[in-house]
Image: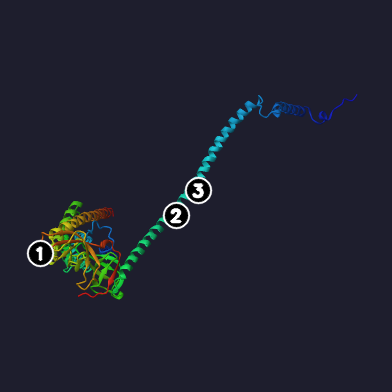
Amino acid sequence: VRGLVWGLAIFLMVAFQGAEVNFLEIGGIRPDLVLIAVYGIGLFQGEFAGGLAGLGLGWVIDLFSVGKFYQNMITKGLIGVFAGYLGNWLRHAGLFLHLWILLSLSLLQGTLIAVVLSLIYDSSILSDLWRIVLPQAIYDAVLGSLVLSLISSFHEKRRKTQWVTGGAS
Amino acid sequence: MKQRNPFFFRTFSHKTRKTWLFLLLLILLMIVLISPGMENRSQVSLIEHPVVFVTTLFQEGTAAVTGGISGIWRGYVDLLSVREENERLQTEVARLREEQSLLQEEVLAAGRMRELLEIGRNFPEKAAAAQVIGRDPTNWYRTMVLDKGEEDGIALHGAVVSSRGVVGRVIKVYPHSSRVLLISDRSSSLAGMIQRNRVSGILQGEGGGHLSLEYVPLDESVILGDLVLTSGLEGIFPKGIPVGRVTRVDRKTSPLFLSIQVSPAVDPSKVEEVWVMKGKGP
């Protein structure tokens, strides 16, 4: 049941990411919810789950988009694996650490895509960095770190409660 | 000799007689006191003053207390009815607002449909009117999803137009939906011309919401605000549909061609209904 709920949540998230009206959109920039989700899955479930979720979700996003190469599948897969490794040390990291990591990951992913697109379409990398990559990275970092800190604190609370309950019995 | 004993003295005992006499005296006194007033009702007798004064005080007190209580009660009852009335009116206002909003939406939709039908009359090869149901999930590409697909007669490379001008072309067709590449996407290009002097060029999407009109020679006259139309040379879009207006002209970027920026006539984020032409592209 838990898996089904998570699956449904992820499906809804992907649908929401491409919805006609996205209330999270600011100035034409939509946050990369899939990046945040993959980072979270990797962090809490390990590199295998993270990598698999990244590949799967990235592939779905690529299906809904018109990218000529599987940019989301590749980058999200790598992010999932990386987050899984980070999870060994940073599972209960604070808001600021999540913020910096998400900012770096989103910047890295965006820059990579901008470079590839500039090679295909002869577009300006600087313009893309300024117009898309930077605002999206900031948005992803702020939103993602808030969500992940909430999840972290929830996990921590539950862990403590379980420990106390276990000790009493 | 037998003493005469009148009826009064015979019937009542001594004590009872005294009581009756006292009562009689009182009545007499009352008649005396009232009598001056009988002549002139405006005159007030001496004894009337204190009696009226005390009575008035009592009456005022009673009136104040009862008035207060009845006032409070009336207020409470009124408040209850006002509150009920208020709730009823608030519900009514909310309902009317909702109704007004729905009607307003209906009017706007009808206006848009009218405009769409108007523009649809000019294109005999139109396939279907469709509604926008989705956007590109990434910020890198400019696409939208329509609620009509292959089963509605939509084919690959069908031109998509709105009441204001060109929107894009169909790049993927599913049975019940289709994906449209917007003209502002970096991978989009179409043939265009300036309405004023019929100067032709290639309109290339820049990815950031603007287009550039390429391959216009340096010696051509292009001014800010010029209307750019489709020229129909690429075989997808019908000729003469508005694409946008010139917002920047630079003569120094290239030694051969003008650098012209065009702002699209259609803001894709505000498009809700579109016409899709029959696909006939490459």
Work out whether mark 2 precedes mark 1 in sequence or the reverse, and give the earlier one: 2
Q: In this rendering, do the residues under marks 2 and 1 share a single chain?
A: yes
- Residue B6: image location, x then y, percent: 84, 28
Callout 3 amino acid = Ser
Name which quarter of the figure residue B269 lies in. bottom left
Front tag of 1 and 3: 1
Give the residue number, with chain letter if any, for mark 2.
B92
Residue placed under numbered mark 1 in the picture: B256
Element on which disc 3 rests: helix
Instruction: Residue A105: tell me if it is visible.
Output: no
Measure how far apart labels 2 and 1 are at the Cα level: 68 Å
Q: Secondary structure at mark 2?
A: helix
* CA separation in Å, label 2 and label 3: 16 Å
Which chain hosts label 3? B
Residue B145: tell me if it is visible: yes
- Which class describes the residues within 10 Å of circle 2: few (<14), some (14-19), or many (20+)? few
Q: Residue under label 3, please give it.
A: B81
The image quarter containing residue B271 is: bottom left
Which kind of residue does numbered mark 1 sit on? Answer: Leu
The number of numbered discs placed on residues in the rendered structure image is 3
